[in-house]
């Protein structure tokens, strides 16, 4: 028998023993236990050390707001630091270890900090560690960092999976306690689609802990009845173990369902957590109220806990928090605890009630000291006694546990996630949700109602009125019932305490810290938070903030209303990265796009490279080639001497049709397209409205009112959206339509002097220069009319070249056929690396040069810009002085003075002999490669007044690599400047 | 009162009763030489340097909320000077140099921690862009190192090197970059400015700008009219709202940027890392929380909160970069209002209205700029001429086309 | 804002389906408008705190550009209209 488990009672399954370990020691508990309840049952109340002073700590709550009892659960990639023992369900083999202690939980060197606390007060670190300056990073900060933080996260990858889903409902009920379930039943009967989300393993909220009766029926019986009915409604979804963590715009709530956090063996086919995005027409916030601790000396010693926690241990888990507990009762609810304790056979050491009239109905055995306060709890790792000030005298009372009933704070966090501020109610002595929230209604304990009967009636009534508002006829499932009295009177801190009186447990913020903050000018609630760290711990101030506000109010001599709260923000309780990321991880981080020629490239031995979402063939290594350069050089040389085939399917392709297609193109390109003849392609430059180049590509006129536009791979989606914007938002009067056909066509470039001969074997049409001249574009058939294709005589490489587009499904077969036809001519497959080399040799630009800060003139395209068109995107802004300045960096070629020297992209250009300073920066190398055709490195560069400086020697400066090369500025066209090959 | 280890000890012996307020709570005077609108980082830094360096002490800082309640108190605390363009680079390097001596200068430990920033790259194109950037940094003496994959792996072995959708090819290391305790910057500047006589007036909202004969003569506020010789706006996300009071239309949109902190952890990541294949960057605070963020939500907003889809995107990129983050829990998200300018770079300039000065357009990069922004703005106000490192931050550059567009995405603020 | 946008063609759809391209209250100037007018169109923004019109593209849906009118402080969406309709209406006005 575990020493603190009572012989009977509670909701645990005593027939089901569960073995677990804590700090390497084996224990057992029962199904239905949390880690905390099982540890307490085993007499383990020391579970953790606090953040700053390393004070010994045990659970102060029995739920989600627990600031103290944080442990690390799991091993390897499943290690979860900072897990609240009060919410961690027990499972067979659970392996928990304590945190923030060295060498052990019971003997922690760090607790010496407690002795130094006078100098370690709020914000002490802002006032010291400044000298000598270098010591901060070398000495002080590493020490602080090591001391700070709680648990240790793993570096091992998480082996488990996560998923996300959307859900839609008429009514979302947040919190499956008395108010929530009665609201849900009311809505379910009205036929509304209802989702009930509750953070605990079992629905019920306080009904799980309540030993009493509601309107003559045992709470547990009421709960069973509610759940039985709800489970029978097909329009109701009950999500237990599901925490609604945030309220977002448009009635969307985020929730995390813990699917497999409570099982000994993870089923790999199911997620461990599931993120729900719930779009609700309306929500009822039925999250109950949080009991506040009381602030007195030693209020953090293990064994001091809220009264509702002590009652929950007792009634729900059958665990005695102590043998002779005392109760500090500032709220009549604590007397029910006293009654339960006595009913379980325990002697309550004393009930200390600061109110003169508290607990009038108490009929139990324990002595009630009215008008009295607990000034201090005594003990080291467990409570041994308490000091009580009664009638002006101090009295020491032996007790091994102490329950604190400080009053209740409605749990209204979610109601304020969208900017609303809580409102202080003097009558309720509590911060309430503001009224008039759009789409959210607060019910029950969260609306500061007292007593389960009143709470249930409120849930039902609120549901009925919400239902009416959203078009359902609902009748409250429960009749109204009176509230219970005996509410707490404000007691924010007990005066005259000896020991430290903690407000924020985890961060060790005590009353003196808040006093110091006020004295130093940090009395605003937000400044006090930031200066003292109050409310910044893992519980985000759920437990301590209202006390802190009360203490600040007293210190400043104002009301809590004037102090106000800090901002409630998501997440209500912490949410794992895993749940938020869902399936998007590892290789599945982003979708994969594969070209219709991917299989062909793979068969030909391609090495692939990630290009945005695409995998593109980079080069095609052959036997004996040991470096990528060997392969690329060979591909370039082969293409330039014979022929090569390159997959260019990833280029964006947009079909443009309509009576005004020509007009439209004239407006989106800076050069003219209206006069482009049918059957011809043209290179086009598309500007942004600010005059800078956006994208480039070729567009062909296939029919009078049908164009085929290509874009760069990277800007395909952007250009499509841009065209749609222009057509819909700017010029809706134009008759023009677009279809993205990127995925419809397999497109391949066939380049090289043999390309015409090779293609002629495949294409039915006449490919002679007369029939298919440079920039010809036409629909052709292949294989004797078997396939309709589009053929363009365009060239990125500078060779005689074509691009052939065939329906995607035929791509691989056509590519195979071309390779076969080209075999005798020595054709090779080439990848994007060789493509890049050849375009640099030819001086063609890509987005390396079109980097969003260049205008056409910068790239030598100045004369392409139409001077006659009345309007095109970018025209007006191009005229600005900053865009016409001749001093702008402009495109040139660059090559090494000594052909043996190389250089790389990203090098900067400095004048010969100039000192390497930013002022002397002349430009940079935007593209570079080794040119197998020339036998040395070449580059394109954007250099101030570059075209005026051809032949000038410059420094190619790459300090990052320690490479400093003498270069010379040249024309950007390194190969075939007369285009003889192109027209060949 | 000077802060030191000794002061801590002596005050501790006196039960910590002897600490005096770090800053006064003055009532506004009828007239000041300079009024600064905005008691955030930039406004407070401006006041500090005006009073300490430029000898103008008859200064008020008007803050509508509490001191430091804007973006200085809700950012991800990163400082860096790894800029590309000559219009930006010297300015941010000035800022870095000021950070490096800041704490001794204003006698407040803001935990300036130059733990290094690594920008990961995942493609040849990104590597080339970082090479260009790194060399620009080298030309200015900022210091930059190009790390190859192995070097990154040695430094950050826990990132996804084996199963990544976009493999990590290397990184650009900026060793002098790092983090600073953000709130402390506001407090340090406030305390310093206050000690030089500056009036920091909290909970004082500017409701109007008074002009006489075309010149600004003062401001209407929730605490009444306050006159001034010069009016300096440093209102960040609310710049448009304040400028509007003077009939000034700005090249600015206000956008929301979310940021996040995890539960406190023992040391997990030592430097700042930015992901190159998605929007994610992360560092660890001295308190142990992982501080991280991603991209702006993308729509105009004055509400300091964002939406769940962005939260998910950020987490997705985080787990893609560091798979073991999966089990780490995110504690809190928040949102700040970014004054997104039309080219992604700031404005520190006079306006066409006499006596009206503008400091705005910081996008999501205002924190790191705080010292230099304050210094250069103070210089501009005091000397009526731009500081040499801030000459490019002109308001008329959108008319002249002398833009400072680091990303090269043009006049669409939500892309910067 | 905007967890959900009600597309006039597709109904309420999650924000992730849309991309956003700034101020929809601006009218593209006539080609021969002066430099100041063009500067104002391309670079100056009302940036209202309150009602604001913004272009949203239903990129992962019907591919229509929409004008979303909403409040930048409360994030309340007042209306969503097809951008072509909005432009025609403005032209007619």
Image (cartoon, coloured by chain):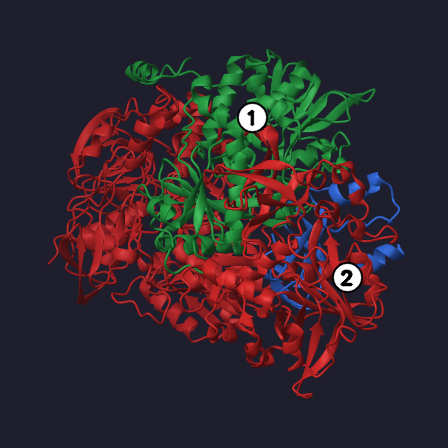
Left/right placement of residue B221 relative to residue B266 reads right
Closer to the observer: label 2 or label 1? Answer: 1
CA gap, disc 2 and disc 1? 44 Å
**Residue at 37% across, 39% down:** A544
Can you tell which quarter of the image residue A548 is in?
top left
Q: Where's residue B153, x and y in %?
A: 35, 49
A475 vs A763, nearest the viewer = A763
Chain ID for red:
A
- Residue A302, image x and y in percent? 22, 41
Chain B rendered in what hue?
A: green
Whole-percent x and y of residue A850?
Answer: 66, 50
Determine if marks 2 and 1 fall on one subunit.
no
| The disc label shown at residue A363, or none | none
> Badge 2 is on which residue?
A728
Query: In which quadrant of the rendered image does the N terminus of chain A lie?
Result: bottom left
Q: Secondary structure at mark 2?
A: helix
Chain that bears disc 2? A
Q: Nearer the viewer, residue B88 or B290?
A: B88
Label 1 lies in what chain?
B
Disc 1 target residue = B372
The residue shown at (73%, 81%) is A765
Say which colour chain C has.
Answer: blue
Image quadrant assignment for residue A475: bottom right
Residue that appears at 26% across and 58% down: A316
Q: Nearer the viewer, residue A693 or A101?
A: A693
Using a 10 Å C-alpha cutoff, classify the residue at mark 2 as few (fewer than 14 neighbours), some (14 to 19) or many (20 or more).
Answer: many
Q: Is residue A62 above or below residue A910?
A: below
């Amino acid at each position: 028998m575990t020493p603190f488990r009572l012989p009977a009672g509670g909701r645990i399954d005593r027939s089901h023993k569960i073995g677990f370990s804590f700090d390497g020691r084996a224990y057992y508990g029962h199904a239905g236990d949390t880690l905390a309840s099982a540890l307490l049952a085993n007499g383990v109340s020391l579970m953790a050390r606090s953040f700053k002073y390393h004070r010994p700590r045990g659970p102060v709550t029995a739920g989600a707001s627990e600031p103290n009892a944080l442990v690390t659960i799991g091993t390897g990639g499943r290690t979860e630091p900072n897990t609240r023992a009060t919410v961690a369900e027990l499972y067979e083999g659970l392996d928990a270890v304590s945190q923030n202690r060295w060498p052990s939980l019971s003997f922690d060197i760090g607790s010496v900090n407690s002795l130094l606390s006078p100098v370690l007060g709020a914000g002490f670190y802002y006032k010291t560690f400044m000298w000598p300056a270098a010591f901060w990073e070398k000495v002080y900060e590493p020490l602080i960092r090591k001391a700070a933080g709680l648990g240790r996260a793993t570096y091992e990858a998480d082996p488990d999976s996560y998923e996300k889903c959307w859900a839609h409902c008429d009514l979302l009920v947040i919190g499956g306690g008395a108010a929530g379930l009665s609201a849900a039943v009311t809505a379910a009967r009205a036929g509304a689609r209802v989702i009930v989300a509750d953070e605990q393993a079992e629905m019920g909220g306080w009904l799980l802990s309540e030993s009493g009766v509601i309107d003559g029926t045992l709470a547990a019986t009421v709960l069973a009845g509610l759940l039985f009915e709800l489970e029978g409604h097909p329009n109701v979804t009950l999500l237990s173990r599901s925490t609604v963590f945030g309220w977002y715009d448009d009635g969307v709530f985020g929730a995390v369902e813990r699917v497999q956090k409570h099982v000994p063996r993870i089923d790999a086919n199911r997620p461990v957590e599931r993120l729900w995005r719930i779009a609700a027409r309306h929500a009822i916030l039925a999250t109950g109220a949080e009991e506040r601790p009381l602030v007195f000396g030693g209020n953090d010693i293990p064994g001091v806990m809220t009264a509702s926690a002590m009652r929950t241990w007792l009634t729900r888990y059958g665990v005695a928090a102590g043998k002779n507990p005392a109760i500090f009762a500032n709220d009549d609810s604590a007397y029910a605890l006293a009654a339960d304790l006595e009913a379980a056979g325990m002697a309550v050491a004393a009930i200390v009630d600061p109110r003169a009239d508290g607990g009038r109905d108490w009929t139990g055995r324990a002595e009630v000291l009215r008008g009295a306060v607990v000034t201090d709890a005594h003990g080291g790792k467990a409570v041994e006694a308490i000091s009580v000030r009664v009638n002006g005298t101090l009295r020491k009372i032996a007790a091994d546990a102490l329950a604190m009933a400080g009053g209740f704070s409605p749990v209204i966090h979610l109601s304020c996630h969208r900017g609303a501020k809580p409102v202080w109610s003097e009558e309720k002595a509590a911060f309430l949700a503001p009224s008039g929230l759009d789409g959210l209604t607060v019910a029950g304990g969260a609306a500061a109602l007292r007593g389960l009967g009143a709470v249930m009636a409120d849930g039902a009534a609120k549901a009925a009125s919400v239902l009416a508002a959203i078009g359902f006829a609902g009748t409250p499932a429960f009749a109204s019932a009176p509230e219970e009295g005996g509410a707490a009177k404000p007691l924010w801190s007990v005066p005259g305490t000896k020991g430290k009186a903690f407000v924020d447990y985890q961060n060790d913020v005590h009353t003196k810290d808040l006093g110091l903050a006020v004295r130093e000018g940090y009395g605003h609630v937000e400044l006090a938070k930031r200066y003292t760290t109050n409310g910044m711990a893992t519980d985000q101030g759920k437990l301590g903030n209202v006390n802190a506000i009360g203490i600040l109010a007293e210190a400043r001599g104002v009301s809590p209303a004037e102090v106000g709260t800090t901002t409630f923000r998501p997440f209500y309780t912490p949410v794992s990265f895993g749940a938020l990321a869902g399936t998007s991880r590892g290789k599945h981080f982003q979708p994969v796009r594969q070209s219709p020629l991917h299989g062909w490239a793979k068969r030909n031995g391609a090495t692939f490279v990630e290009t945005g979402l695409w995998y593109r063939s980079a080069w095609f290594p052959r036997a004996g080639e040991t470096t990528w350069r060997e392969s690329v050089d060979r591909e370039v040389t082969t293409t330039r001497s014979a022929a090569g085939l390159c997959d260019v399917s990833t280029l964006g392709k947009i079909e443009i049709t309509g009576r005004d297609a020509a007009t439209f193109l004239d407006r989106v390109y800076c050069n003219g397209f209206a006069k482009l003849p049918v059957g011809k392609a043209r290179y086009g430059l598309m500007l942004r409205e600010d005059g800078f180049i956006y994208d480039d590509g070729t567009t062909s006129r296939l029919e009078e009112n049908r164009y085929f536009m290509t874009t760069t791979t990277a800007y395909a989606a952007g250009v499509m959206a841009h065209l749609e914007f222009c057509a819909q938002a700017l010029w809706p009067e134009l008759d023009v339509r677009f279809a993205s056909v990127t995925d419809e066509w397999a497109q391949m470039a066939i380049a090289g002097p043999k390309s015409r001969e090779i293609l002629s074997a495949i294409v039915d049409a006449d490919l002679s220069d007369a029939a298919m001249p440079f920039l010809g574009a036409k629909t052709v058939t292949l294989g004797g009319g078997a396939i309709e294709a589009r053929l363009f005589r365009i060239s990125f490489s500078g060779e005689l070249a074509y691009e052939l587009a065939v329906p995607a499904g035929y791509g691989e077969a056509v590519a195979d056929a071309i390779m076969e036809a080209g075999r005798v001519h020595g054709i090779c497959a080439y990848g994007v690396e060789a493509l890049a080399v050849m375009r640099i040799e030819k001086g063609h630009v890509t987005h390396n040069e079109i980097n969003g800060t260049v205008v056409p003139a910068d790239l030598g395209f100045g004369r392409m810009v139409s001077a006659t068109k009345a309007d095109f995107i970018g025209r007006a802004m191009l005229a600005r002085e900053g865009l016409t300045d001749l001093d702008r960096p402009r495109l040139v070629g660059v090559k090494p003075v000594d052909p043996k020297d190389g250089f790389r992209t990203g090098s900067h250009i400095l004048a010969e002999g100039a000192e390497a300073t930013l002022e002397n920066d002349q430009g940079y190398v935007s593209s570079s490669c080794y040119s197998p055709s020339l036998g040395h490195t070449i580059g394109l560069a954007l250099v101030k007044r570059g075209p005026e400086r051809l032949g000038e020697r410059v420094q190619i400066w790459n300090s990052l690599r320690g490479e400093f090369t003498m270069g010379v500025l040249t024309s950007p066209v390194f190969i075939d400047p007369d285009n003889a090959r192109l027209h060949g | 009162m000077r802060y030191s280890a000794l002061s801590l000890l002596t005050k501790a012996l006196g039960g910590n009763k002897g600490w005096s307020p770090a800053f006064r709570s003055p009532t506004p005077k009828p007239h000041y030489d300079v009024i600064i609108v905005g008691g955030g980082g930039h406004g407070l830094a401006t006041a500090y340097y005006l009073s300490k360096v430029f000898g103008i002490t008859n200064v008020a800082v008007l803050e509508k909320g509490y001191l430091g309640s804007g973006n200085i108190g809700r950012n991800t605390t990163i400082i860096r000077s790894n800029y590309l363009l000559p219009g930006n680079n010297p300015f941010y390097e000035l800022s870095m140099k000021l950070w490096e001596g800041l704490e001794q200068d204003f006698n407040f430990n803001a935990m300036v921690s130059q733990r290094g920033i690594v920008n990961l790259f995942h493609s040849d194109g990104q590597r080339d862009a970082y090479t260009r950037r790194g060399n620009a940094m080298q030309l200015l003496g900022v210091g930059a190192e190009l790390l190859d994959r192995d070097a990154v792996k040695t430094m950050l072995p826990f990132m996804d090197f084996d199963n990544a959708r976009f493999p990590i090819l290397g990184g650009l290391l900026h060793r002098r970059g790092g983090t600073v305790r953000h709130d402390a910057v506001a407090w340090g500047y406030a305390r310093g400015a206050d000690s030089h006589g500056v009036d920091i007036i909290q909970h004082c909202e500017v409701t109007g700008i008074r002009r006489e004969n075309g010149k600004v003569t003062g401001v209407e506020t929730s605490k009444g009219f306050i006159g001034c010789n010069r009016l300096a706006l440093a209102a960040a996300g609310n710049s448009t709202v304040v400028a509007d009071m003077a009939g000034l239309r700005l090249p600015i949109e206000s956008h929301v940027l979310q940021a996040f902190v995890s539960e406190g952890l023992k040391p997990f990541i030592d430097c700042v890392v930015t992901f190159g294949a998605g929007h994610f960057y992360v560092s660890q605070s001295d308190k142990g929380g992982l501080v991280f963020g991603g991209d702006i939500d993308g729509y105009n907003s004055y509400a300091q909160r964002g939406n769940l889809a962005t939260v998910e995107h950020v987490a997705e990129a985080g787990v893609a970069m560091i798979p073991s983050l999966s089990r780490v829990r995110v504690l809190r998200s928040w949102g700040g209002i970014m004054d997104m300018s039309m080219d992604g770079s700031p404005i520190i300039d006079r306006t066409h209205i006499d006596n009206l000065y503008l400091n705005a357009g910081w996008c999501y990069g205002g924190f790191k700029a705080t010292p230099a922004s304050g210094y250069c703005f103070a210089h501009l106000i005091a000397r009526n001429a731009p500081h040499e490192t801030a000459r490019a931050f002109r308001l008329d550059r959108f008319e002249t086309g002398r833009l400072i567009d680091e990303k090269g995405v043009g006049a669409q603020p939500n892309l910067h | 804002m905007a967890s959900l946008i009600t597309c006039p063609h597709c109904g309420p759809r999650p924000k992730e389906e849309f991309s956003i391209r700034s101020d929809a209250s601006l009218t593209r100037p006539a080609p021969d408008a002066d430099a100041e007018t063009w500067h104002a169109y391309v670079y100056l923004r009302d940036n209202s705190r309150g009602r604001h019109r913004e272009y949203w593209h239903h990129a992962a849906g019907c591919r229509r550009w929409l004008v979303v009118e909403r409040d930048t402080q409360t994030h309340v969406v007042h209306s969503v209209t097809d951008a072509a309709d909005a432009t025609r209406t403005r032209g007619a006005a």
